Image (tube, rainbow, N blue to C red):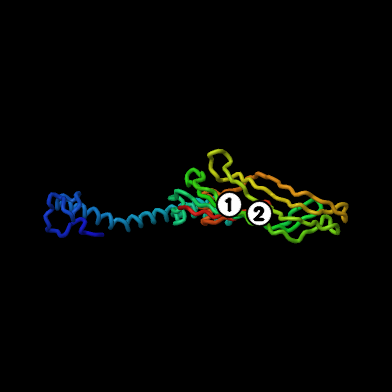
């Protein structure tokens, strides 16, 4: 503490009606200075005692809770699990909790990855790998989008084409197959929050191909594009707070979605 803010340049300096350049206007008399100093010192000295009092009260509450749990007609495992949950609920807020509680906005980064078999035609499929990345900023209170959404669609890697059933003609692609091209993301309702689920619109492009006809014959299949709308999970701030992490992973319909949320 800078005691010159209370005493000015020195304890014997004239106050000049409390308006000295070194002395705040609030300290108008020597008696006022002494009283203010005493208040500050008392507050500083009482902090350890206050902390000890709070810790003692917490220990007493935990002891009482243990006694009540022990009196319940539960197994040892059930009692231990209940005690663990109660202790977690009583734990003081962590730095992670404070970051989320003070945040004004949240930057999300969502990465979706698919790696599995995908049908190209009723007569054949392939191993497909695709990846999409979405970034946006949400208002921490309303969950509404505050900034432009940035989307990056990577090219689909297609390999190991196989006929269905086995032994028939293997399909041939005459162009690029794109499994998942994200075109838009929006809240479920107009002007609503983007969490806990959003609506995503994407397209799937099939190139022209040569497919099997009566197993060993061949036929030409024209290129086509499919449009699809589905819901995408967007974890809420409370979910990230409970997870004690800024990252979360969910798996759905062959996709692995990795969520990163940075409160700020």
Residue 63 seen from this side: no
Return the x and y of residue 258 as percentages of the image width and height: 59, 55
Q: Residue at x 28, y 57 (%)?
A: 44
Could you say whether the residue bearing mark 1 is in a helix, strand or loop?
Answer: strand
Q: Residue furthest bottom?
A: 160
Quadrant of the image occupied by residue 131: bottom right
Determine which of the numbered discs, if any, sits on residue 151 in the image. 1
Q: Quick one: 54 or 200, which is closer to the camera?
A: 200
Q: Quick one: 211 or 37, which is closer to the camera?
A: 211
Give the mark nearer the N terminus: 1 vs 2.
Answer: 1
> Marks 2 and 1: in contact by CB < 8 Å?
no
Return the x and y of residue 12 as percentages of the image width and height: 12, 58
Q: Residue furthest top?
A: 190
Q: Residue at x 66, y 57 (%)?
A: 155
Q: CA distance from mark 1 to mark 2?
A: 17 Å
Q: Quick one: 188 or 170, which is closer to the camera?
A: 170
- Depth check, mark 1 against mark 2: the one in front is 1
Could you say whether the residue bearing mark 2 is in a helix, strand or loop?
Answer: strand
Q: Which residue is mark 2?
A: 255
Q: Is residue 33 left or right of residue 98?
A: left
Return the x and y of residue 41 as percentages of the image width and height: 24, 56
């Amino acid at each position: 503490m800078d005691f010159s803010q209370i005493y000015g340049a020195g304890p014997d300096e004239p106050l000049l009606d409390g308006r000295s350049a070194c002395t705040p206007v609030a300290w108008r008399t020597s008696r006022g200075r002494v009283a203010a100093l005493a208040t500050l010192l008392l507050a500083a000295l009482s902090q350890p005692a206050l902390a000890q009092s709070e810790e003692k009260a917490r220990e007493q509450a935990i002891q009482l809770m243990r006694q009540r749990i022990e009196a319940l007609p539960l197994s040892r495992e059930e009692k231990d699990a209940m005690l663990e949950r109660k202790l977690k609920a009583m734990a003081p807020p962590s730095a992670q909790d404070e970051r989320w509680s003070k945040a004004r906005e949240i930057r999300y980064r969502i990465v979706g990855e698919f790696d599995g078999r995908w049908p190209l035609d009723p007569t054949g499929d392939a191993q497909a790998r695709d990846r999409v990345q979405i970034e946006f900023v949400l208002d921490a209170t309303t969950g509404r989008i505050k900034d432009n959404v940035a989307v990056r669609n990577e090219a689909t890697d297609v390999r190991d084409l196989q006929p269905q059933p086995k032994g028939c003609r293997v399909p041939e692609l005459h162009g690029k197959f794109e499994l998942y091209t994200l075109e838009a993301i929006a809240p479920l309702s107009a002007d609503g929050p983007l969490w806990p689920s959003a609506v995503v619109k994407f397209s799937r492009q099939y190139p022209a191909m040569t497919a099997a006809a009566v197993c060993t014959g061949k036929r030409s299949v024209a290129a086509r594009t499919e449009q699809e709308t589905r819901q995408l999970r967007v974890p809420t701030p409370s979910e990230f707070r409970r997870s004690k992490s800024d990252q979360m992973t969910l798996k759905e319909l062959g996709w692995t979605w990795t969520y990163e949320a940075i409160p700020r």
